[in-house]
Image (cartoon, rainbow, N blue to C red):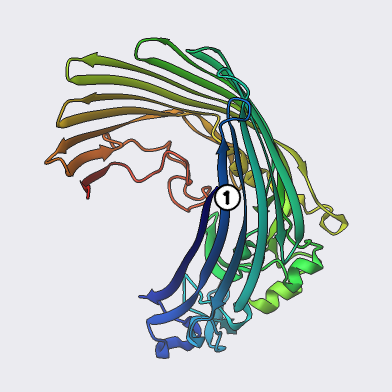
Amino acid sequence: WNVDLNNTFGSNKMHYYGRGTLNASLGELSPTEFDDGGFSLEQNTTSLDFTRLFDNVLSGLNVAYGAQYRVDNYKIFAGEQGSWFNYGGVLIDSLFDEETGDFIGLDTLTRPGGSQGFPGFQPGDVTDEFRTNLGAYIDLEADFSKMFSMSIAGRYENYSDFGNTINGKIAARLAITDKFALRASASTGFRAPSLAQIYFSSTFTTVEGGEIFDQVIADNKSTVARLLGIPSLKQEESVNASFGLTAKPALGLSITVDAYYVSIDDRIVLTDGFGTDDDVIGDDLAALGVTYAQFFTNAVSTTTTGLDAIIAYRIYMQENTLTFTFAGNFNNMTIDSVYTNELLAGKEQSYFSDRERSFLLASAPPVKMNLTTEYATNKVNLNLRINYFGELTFINYSGNEYTYEATPSIDLSVGYDISNNTHLTIGASNLFNTYPTPQDPYETETGGAWDAVQMGFNGTFIFGKLGFKF
């Protein structure tokens, strides 16, 4: 038996500082820099794995089993008081008659508190939560002959905060000839809600339709979430199936095509905004000093079907090679169900609007293709890639559709072997500075000319890389 005992530890921390801002409720006494607080995540994973190949069973049987223990720790720490507190500063505004211009009195206007643009994390946001997870698995892979193989696997998981789950997978491969094979697989899966999705809480300033206001992402355990009947987050569950083929019909030519089906239940999304006009939580939001609240929730189920295709052709020219590679992904996602409750009746557009549905569907673009040409010599390689991003349709704040047209872009890079151990690459992504279709900034999620579409909106990116081998 081969035995592998390993431990992996990782951590990250985001600490925000605001500069060039102020707390308006402090007036002229306000500093222009703030410690806004932040959050961190630590994860420690210990695994023990056993593997063995029994070459005298059938035409070969590989057995693997093992266990894993993981500990996660998620923290939010508050910023300094001035980054989030409202000190009650007011403005005295003179009121005048619109027709005569006569002075008619004074009005008191409250200044907003917290650092402008990015209010700091508040004491109410602070959290320090742990989760433990114990998993065990077994994986069997058998070659029944040189032409046919199968694998079957099962995995058990226990989470300290939501219980148990059992999942499995079965796969098979049949070689019709030495140059053509069929393959298929089916499995169940799950994804536990992250600690950040359960406990993240933050107030931030946002822009929608030209209006500026403060909004809160309330944690899943918060009072406002419970008042709306938002249930505790649970795991997403999936059913997956695929069927494909691989072929090498000619010298230098290889083809792989896979069709797939993915069904996800209890998919976790971020809701739209519930406002201060809400009959259930409106007063609570006003007391928090925000206009809208959002929540993470298991809101939808989706089904995705699609096709992946890769066709590669390599031409050998003495010591040089010329390779053409086509890769295409064709997707169709549908939203099957939206899970609500009686308290959300009539509030479906605040819970999961048509706009948010369009963003979810766009996360699996219907078409993405690229064609790569690579010419390689002993020391130099030239890489040219043509990318194609299919058309995307979104819903704006007014409820109308807007479209990002299908767009091509070109990447180019040149590599050179300086020595046997050193390689230099210079290139450009999006060589001709192509951008998505411009949109009305008042209607986009970013408040700019484009949403965060897959092709990106940063234009040309020029890079250089120097690699070393030891």
Q: Position of residue 348 (x, y in %)?
A: 76, 50
In the image, farthest residue toward the left: 418
In the image, farthest residue toward the front: 56
The quadrant where residue 418 appears: top left
Q: Is residue 108 among what the camera can see?
A: yes
Nearer to us in this view, 82 or 235: 235
The quadrant where residue 90 appears: bottom right
Q: Position of residue 286 (x, y in %)?
A: 69, 75
Q: Reply above or below: 434 against 464.
A: above
Residue that appears at 48% across and 66% down: 9
Q: Reply above or below: 39 against 339.
A: below
Nearer to us in this view, 350 or 13: 13
Q: Is residue 346 left or right of residue 191?
A: right
Q: Position of residue 45 (x, y in %)?
A: 55, 63
Which residue is denoted by mark 1 in the rendering?
50
Q: Is residue 362 left or right of residue 300?
A: left
In the image, farthest residue toward the top: 250
Nearer to us in this view, 282 or 232: 232
Residue that appears at 51% across and 87% down: 81
Q: Reply above or below: 405 against 196.
A: above
Q: Crowding near pointer 1: few (<14 within 10 Å), some, many (20+)?
A: some
How many numbered marks, from 0 up? 1
Q: Is residue 363 among what the camera can see?
A: no
In the image, farthest residue toward the right: 342
The quadrant where residue 371 appears: top left
Residue that appears at 64% across and 37% down: 140
Q: Reply above or below: 468 against 162.
A: above
The amino acid type of the residue labelled 1 equals Phe
Residue that appears at 19% across and 20% down: 320
Q: Secondary structure at mark 1?
A: strand
